[in-house]
Amino acid sequence: MVDDSIILHRDDPDKDPLIGHVKVTREDWLNVARHILINEGISQVKILTISERLDVSRSSFYWYFESRKDLLDALLGDWEKLNTATIVKHCELPAASIGSALCNFFRCFIDPALFDRGLDFAVREWSRRDLGVRERIDSADQKRVEAIINMFKAHGYETYEADCRARILYFMQLGYHALDVNETMDVRMSRLQGYLEGFSGREISPEEYQDLVAFAKEKAEH
């Protein structure tokens, strides 16, 4: 059976009805495969396992993918588009100050729709067993760090300082998730000014982060 958190195309009233003998879509295959990857690991991402959970035959898999490798490549592509591209995009958003720029960065990690931390760590675990995936992880980390470096440089930091601060910020954020820190959003936001000043080395006014606090509160309520 499919996990209740996954809404298949056929069960989603907001999507067009499936036509003919089609029971599931390519997106359905990917969503279930992603869920298995996150919760059970790459070894369990199998065509038969996914087909059983979708309650369809294995043959329908080949309507959308050439092979299991094709499916895994698609999963990696989605991970890069969701997680890496999102961080890069938010680092490039216009910001009046480094405080505001850092708030743009943190939005990625407050909203699960912007950055899937479970997926990120599942891919990292996968990379321990696959050199090709390890290379993609390394490339993604490089792109993310470079985007953060450029964010700092855009606000007047010299290259060396921008590089160091970018790595402190990025490695802290990954470690924060890796430790699975258990705290309320209110507690996290109560430390925000100190965090921003620590990462930037500059004084940060409440006006620079009030939008992020409101954004965080909204997400926590949902």
Image (cartoon, helix red, strand yellow):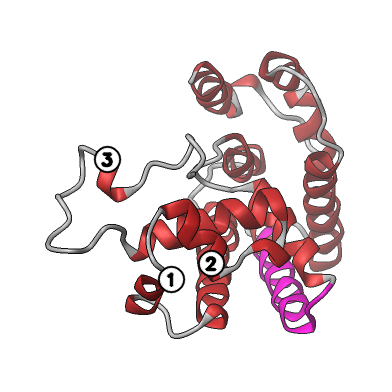
Amino acid type of the residue that numbered disc 1 sits on in the rendered structure: Arg
**Mark 3 and mark 1 residues within 8 Å of each other at the beta carbon:** no
Q: What is the number of the mark on residue 58?
A: 1
User: What stretch of residues is rendered in magenta?
Assistant: 129-148
Q: Residue at x 62, y 46 (%)?
A: 105
Checking the image for residue 12, the label placed there is 3
Element type at marker 2? helix
Nearer mark to the viewer, of 3 and 2 = 2
Q: Is residue 23 positioned above or below 176 on the image?
A: below
Q: Which residue is mark 2?
A: 48
Give how far apart the Cα atoms at labels 3 and 2 are: 24 Å
Q: Does 133 lie within the magenta span? A: yes
Q: Are marks 2 and 1 in contact (CB under 8 Å)?
A: yes
**Considering the numbered disc 1 on the image, is that residue within a helix, a strand or a loop?**
helix
Q: Give, as a three-letter code, the residue at label 2.
A: Leu
**Going from the N terminus, do you reach mark 2 or mark 1 first?**
2
Q: Position of residue 42 (x, y in %)?
A: 70, 65
Q: Residues within 10 Å of mark 2 (few under 14, many from 20)?
A: some
Give 216 or 77, whichever is nearer the viewer.
77
Q: What residue is at 74 percent from the left and 22 percent from the top?
A: 188
